[in-house]
Every structure is written in structure tokens, then in C-alpha cells.
Image (cartoon, helix red, strand yellow):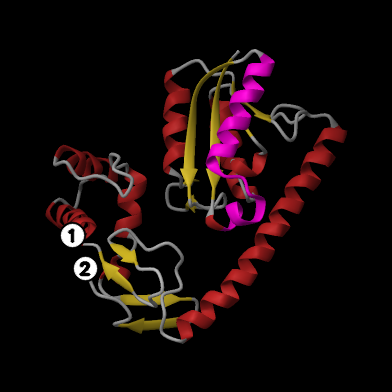
Amino acid sequence: MNVIGYVRVSTQGQAKDGYSLAYQQDEIRSYCQEQGWNLMNIYSDEGISGAKIDEEALEVDRIGFQTMLAAIAAQTIDAVVVLNTSRLWRSDIVKVLVHREFKKHGVDVRSIEQPTYSIYKKDPNDFLINGLMELLDQYQRLEIALKLGRGRSKKAQQGGYAGGRATFGYKAEIGQKCIQVDEKQAKTVRRVFELKEQHPTWTLTRIAESLNEAGFTTQQGKKFTKVQVKRILDRRDFYSGIYRYGDISAEGLHQAIL
């Protein structure tokens, strides 16, 4: 059976579960070897929520996940192997989107910690058990988000940056309250907005292709995709020096790139 692996960790998820990317990859490799499956590749997303979606395109907003879907469309893959289903989704809407894409190509999910799980199985006992596990996982995620939100809101009220990992184009120095412009990444950000202004009819994919042709790279040194371009364009206010967190909005809390 041909399979591919998928691993994901968010900042809060790694702290809560201890499921580092390396740990998940090792578990997937060992499990596939035990089952006698042909593991063709492992795709990953780091530092991104399992509940994040692109509401406009109605698709899962994860670069590694989108790369995996492209591989599924181009090859004969029987299943995607994960440590548990929470690596693929953390909300009902994302679960629906994942199921839709996998069923389109006849791909199933194999979960190491939920060995009876299948997106095609209709056994009522499995449905109940897996459903309860997913609800518990979602409850824990909401509980953590609430605690983090309180701390970030307080930090924002005091004039500090409370957005977690610094947005592309900026860097956060340890021990400092504010973020600083990363000049190398800032050039990329400016180029994205220049392309959008010069070619208003261009698609996100076309803008990404232009960036790649010119040698621009992501924070991880990889090629741009439409997902990353959209993230930059959606943050025009932030790049203009306006910072918002919840009900808090202020100008001048960080340097403007645009």
C-alpha cells in the first residue's frame, strides 16, 4: 500500500502534547515499517493552527498540506498516515474540507493513535469513540486559546506585541516588547504589493510565480505559493504600521514596511 505521512505542530500544540515534528515523523516511519506500507514522503506544517482556513477560497490554509494535496493528485496514494487526526484538523469545518479533498482522490486516513479510524467507515461504535476523541481535542484547544488570549490581550494593552511568532517581514528579539523590521523579508513584502498594484488582474498564483522567478523565497527559504501571497496581502494594515489585537487598535507600535 502506498502511503504518505503528514505532521503538524502549532506553538500551543507542541507545548501541550510534546508532539514535536521529529517525534511524529519517527512514529510514522516505524508504524509504516511495521505495517509493511510503502511510505513515499512525509509532509509537514510548523507553527500553524489545525483550525486555520482560507475563508475566501474555502480551503485549508496550510502550505505543507496544500503541497501534500498536489502530490495526492499527481500520484496513486492509498492513505495519509498521521499520529492522530488532530494533526489534520482541529475544527469541524476543517474536517469537512479534509474529507472532501481526500475522498476526491480515494485517499483514506490512517491514525496511529486511532487505529480503527477511517473517513469511509460507518460503524456506529467507531463513530461514537472517534467523535468523542475529536470533541475532547477541540475542547482542549479552545481552553488553551482562551488562556493565551488573556495573556496576549494584557500584553497588547501595555503596548507590547502580542501576536505570537513575528509576521513575515519582521523579527522579534528575545526580551524586547516590540518587533523590528527584517530588511531582507521587507523587500519581499514590498515587492508583493508592487506586483499587485502593477498587475491588478493577476491571480495569487501568478504573483507567487513572479516572486519565485525573481529569486524571492519564504522565511524557510522555499518557493512562494498562493497561500503565502494571500497572507501578505491580507496584512496591509499591519505592514502600514497599524496593530490590532481584539478590540485594541493602535498606530506606531511597530515600524511600517509600506
Find the magenta span and give its range: 12-35
Per the image, the residue denoted by label 2 is 257
The answer to whether residue 80 is seen in the rendering is no
Task: Please indicate whether residue 113 sits to the left or right of residue 224 in the image.
Answer: right
Magenta part mainly helix, strand or loop?
helix
Amino acid at circle 2: Ile
Residue 38 belongs to magenta span: no
Using the numbered discs, state the Cα–Cα distance from disc 2 to disc 1 in whole angstroms.
Answer: 7 Å
- Is residue 5 or residue 129 the one in the foreground? 5
Per the image, the residue denoted by label 1 is 190
Is the C-beta separation of discs 2 and 1 under 8 Å? yes
- Single out the residue that lies furthest toward the front: 175
SS assignment at label 1 = helix
Residue in view at x 65 percent, y 56 percent: 16
* Residue 233 image position (x, y, % from top left): 29, 58
- Is residue 22 or residue 208 the one in the foreground? 22
**Residue 198, quarter of the rendered image:** bottom left
Residue in view at x 68 percent, y 17 percent: 34
- Is residue 15 or residue 6 the one in the foreground? 15
SS assignment at label 2 = loop
Q: Measured along the vertical axis of the image, is residue 8 above or below residue 67? A: below
Q: Measured along the vertical axis of the image, is residue 129 above or below residue 165? A: above
Residue 34 belongs to magenta span: yes
